[in-house]
Image (cartoon, helix red, strand yellow):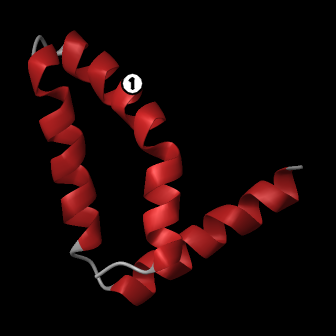
Amino acid sequence: MASEAVNNYITKRYERWLDYSLYHCGLAGISDEATDVLNEVICSLLQKKSRLLDTSYELIDIQKEIGK
């Protein structure tokens, strides 16, 4: 199971990722599959080791802080 930090990260960004998925699936002619594509990607990521996911999100947050 993913940590609370990972769950919060996904929840906060899901709508934006869905828009991105809709865009790319639309280009591929499969707009009706956008939600499924996004959910499959998220499930695939969550199957990775939680520690690695937490580290990845911490690095993303650090990069954002540096970029400010």
Assess disc 1: are there few (<14), some (14-19) or many (≥20) residues with their C-alpha within 10 Å of its C-alpha: some
Is residue 64 toward the left or the right of residue 33 in the image? Answer: right
Q: Residue 66: where, in percent of width, then height?
A: 85, 60
Classify residue 55 by image quadrant. Answer: bottom right
Q: Is residue 29 above or below residue 18?
A: above
Residue at position x 24%, y 41% in the image: 38
Residue 59 against residue 43 in the figure, above or below: below
Total label count? 1
Q: Residue lying farthest right?
A: 68
Residue 66 higher or lower than 34, as above or below: below
| Left or right: 26, with 13 as reference point | left
Residue 10 vs 31, above or below: the answer is below
Q: Which quadrant does the N terminus fall into?
A: bottom left
The residue type indicated by label 1 comes to Asp
Relative to the observer, which residue lies in front, 36 or 67?
A: 36
Q: Secondary structure at mark 1?
A: helix
Q: Which residue is mark 1?
A: 19
* Residue name at image x 16 percent, y 39 percent: 37
* Residue ID at (52%, 59%): 9
Residue 50: x percent and y percent?
37, 84
Residue at the image position 84 percent from the left and 51 percent from the top: 67
Quarter of the view holding residue 32: top left
